[in-house]
Image (spheres, rainbow, N blue to C red):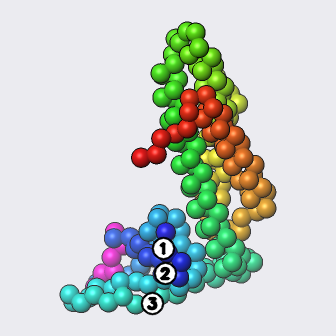
Amino acid sequence: MAGRGARPALVAPTVNLVTKNAGMNRFVWGAQHANGLGSPPGQYSARVTAGGITKTVPLRLRIDPRLAADGTTEADLQAQYAHNLKMREMVADVNALLARVRTAEAKYKGATGAAADTATKVKEVSEIVNTQPIRYGKPGLQAHITYLAGMTARADQKVGQDAFERYTFLRKELEAAKAKLDRAIGPATRM
């Protein structure tokens, strides 16, 4: 993510090249941010190279007029982008927690004595985070988080209040599961 006040970079697809052929030519600009998310309307900079000369020029990405006609605003898309960044972070957090749980499950498999108590606590966190391994099992926290992330990133749209509320709820659940695992096996080590 670009620093405050800096213009983020847009990534243009390299497979869409404008030809020099006479007739109908079409170029589709995929306005993706360098982080892979769709870029919201705003000020950006583009690096243009032609004839061996490279220049950086300002670029204003505007809202799709069809979205604007349907009542979506630039502010809606900027809020969606900010929400999707937070969702991406939460997906990474739940995946990291799941990796820690799986490592701990392997470590404490078949444990006895005091370690068996730790194994039980790890299993409790696993049941919160993982989807139950039975047909039509109860979705775990990871499934809920990835579903919400996909739901709000699929299309340019105003994110509903229910999605913001669900994010807050899931973030609290995730933090509680992290804390429970930390109490059982100790905090995660940072690299």
Circle 3 residue: 58
* Helix, strand or loop at mark 2: loop
Residue denoted by label 2: 6
Q: Are marks 1 and 2 in contact (CB under 8 Å)?
A: yes
Q: Position of residue 127 (x, y in %)?
A: 65, 28
Q: Vertically, is 56 above or below 153?
A: below
Residue kind at label 2, given as amino acid type: Ala
The residue type indicated by label 3 comes to: Pro
68 relative position to 107: left or right: right
Q: Of callouts 2 and 3, which one flags the residue occurring earlier in the amino acid sequence?
A: 2
Q: Which residue is depicted at the point 66% across and 51% down?
A: 148
155 up-or-down from 51: above or below: above
Residue located at (59% from left, 14% from top): 114
From the viewer's perspective, is residue 162 above or below residue 18?
A: above
Q: Which residue corresponds to the image point at 61% horizontal and 59% vertical from the top-left?
A: 86
Give the extent of the magenta segment: 15-20
Q: Which mark is residue 103?
A: none
Mark 2–mark 3 distance (CA, rounded to whole Å) = 12 Å
Q: Is residue 133 visible?
A: no
Residue 73 lies, in percent from the top left, at 70, 79
* Residue 2, label in figure: 1
Within-10-Å neighbours for mark 2: few <14, some 14–19, many 20+:
few
